[in-house]
Image: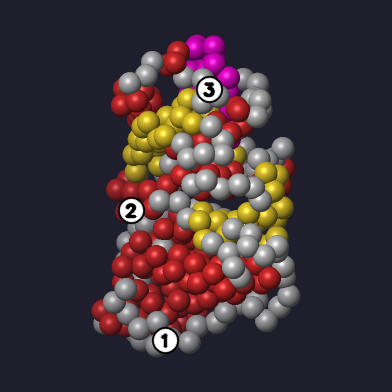
């Protein structure tokens, strides 16, 4: 039976509300997908300020929910369930979204679904593609870098992860170091498109070791050292900046692909590879991962670009999958700053 779910996402610096309709196992309809970015508010600080983010969510969330319902042509009583990110994330923002969802669900007498933000990313490919379980997942974002085997709803096996910085964080800090602005990922990608990826020989941490873990702290330090050799960002030419961005991006892609190559070698032949999270929007990475997957007889499944970064459609979809399976939550469920996927059921 087709279900219609309202989703709310406030885990970081996007305030979002969306309405999704569908049945697990088939691509769904996104009836509305409202996202209000806070980039301008945080740009002067070179990163997300939790207090500013939480206040912005308070100011704008009610209006976004109303707009999502209006765009979908629905009233609240016509929604089958209300889903909201309950963690992990910046706790102030998570609280705003979850409390709003509780109030809406209670007032309308609708089921509440507390969604793990990472599960939202993990299931996004099933929102837009016909994709069966199991599959291999590379989750790459500002706060996370993990390889997981997705066996089913709530069934995630962690195969490897970063031991220090997440890959998105490395992009952001590289951009900040070079004075490229915030958010860093898109800025680095734009500059890299004009550069020579072979100019700087940057390290590939942990690749000589067994396992599937990552490390990006040393790579970030190496970028800073190369910039210092050139006299610092103020003394670097545009060619220097572009070449350093291109070398950094190519190194990241190689690190991720070599780990995925190993993961696919240890997996059943033809297991689909899914990439999700904000960094999944990077076109160089997508192209490299597609080649790696093809070499193993697998296919790469990547969400549309607008669904890679944080959005409420993915939260609504994860909520829809859980609602369809009869997995709802009590109104007293708590927000969580940390919530590993391995703890889900």
* Residue at point 65%, 76% (across, down): 206
> Mark 1 — residue?
198
In the figure, 297 relative to 200: above or below? Answer: above
Element at label 2: helix
Please provide the residue range marked out in magenta.
Answer: 100-115
* Quadrant including the N terminus: top right
For disc 2, the neighbor class at 10 Å (few under 14, some 14 to 19, many from 20) is: some
Q: Is residue 114 magenta?
A: yes
Q: Is residue 40 magenta?
A: no
* Residue at point 32%, 54% (across, down): 44
Q: CA distance from mark 3 to mark 1?
A: 51 Å
* Quadrant including the C terminus: top right
Q: CA distance from mark 2 to mark 1?
A: 31 Å
Q: Which residue extends farthest left?
A: 238
Nearest to N terminus: mark 3 or mark 2: 2
- Image check: 154 left or right of 60? right
Q: CA distance from mark 3 to mark 2?
A: 35 Å
Q: Is residue 294 visible?
A: yes
**Whole-percent x, y for residue 123 in the image:** 56, 44
Nearest to N terminus: mark 3 or mark 1: 3
> Mark 2 — residue?
43
- Image check: 39 left or right of 200? left
* Residue at point 44%, 69% (across, down): 287
Q: Using the rendered view, name the quadrant where residue 158 is placed.
A: bottom right
């Amino acid at each position: 039976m087709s279900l219609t779910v309202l989703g709310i996402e406030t885990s970081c610096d996007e305030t979002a509300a969306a309405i999704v309709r569908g049945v697990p196992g088939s691509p769904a309809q996104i009836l509305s997908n409202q996202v209000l970015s806070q980039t301008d508010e945080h740009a002067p600080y070179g990163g997300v300020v939790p207090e500013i983010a939480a206040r912005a969510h308070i100011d704008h969330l009610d209006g976004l929910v109303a707009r999502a319902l209006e765009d979908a042509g629905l009233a609240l009583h016509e929604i089958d369930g209300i889903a909201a990110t309950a963690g992990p994330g910046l706790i102030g923002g998570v609280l705003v979204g979850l409390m709003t969802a509780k109030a809406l669900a209670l007032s309308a007498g609708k089921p509440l679904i507390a969604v793990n933000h990472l599960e939202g990313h993990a299931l996004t490919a099933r929102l837009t593609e016909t994709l069966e379980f199991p599959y291999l997942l590379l989750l790459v974002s500002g706060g996370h870098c993990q390889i997981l085997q997705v066996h089913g709803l709530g069934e995630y096996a962690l195969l490897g992860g970063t031991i220090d910085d997440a890959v998105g964080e490395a992009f952001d800090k590289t951009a900040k170091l070079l004075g490229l602005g915030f958010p860093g990922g898109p800025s680095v990608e734009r500059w890299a498109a004009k550069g020579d990826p072979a100019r700087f020989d940057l390290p590939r941490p942990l690749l000589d070791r067994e396992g599937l873990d990552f490390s990006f702290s040393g790579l970030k330090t190496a970028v800073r050292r190369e910039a210092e050799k050139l006299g610092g960002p103020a003394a670097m030419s545009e060619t220097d900046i572009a070449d350093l961005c291109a070398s950094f991006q190519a190194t990241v892609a190689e690190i991720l692909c070599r780990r995925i190559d190993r993961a696919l070698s240890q997996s059943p032949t033809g297991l689909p590879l899914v990439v999700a999270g904000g960094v999944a929007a990077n076109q160089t990475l997508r192209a490299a991962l597609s080649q790696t997957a093809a070499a193993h007889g697998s296919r790469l499944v990547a969400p549309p670009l607008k669904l890679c970064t944080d959005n409420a459609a993915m939260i609504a979809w994860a909520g829809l999958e859980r609602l369809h399976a009869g997995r709802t939550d009590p109104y007293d469920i708590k927000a969580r700053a940390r919530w590993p996927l391995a703890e889900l059921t």
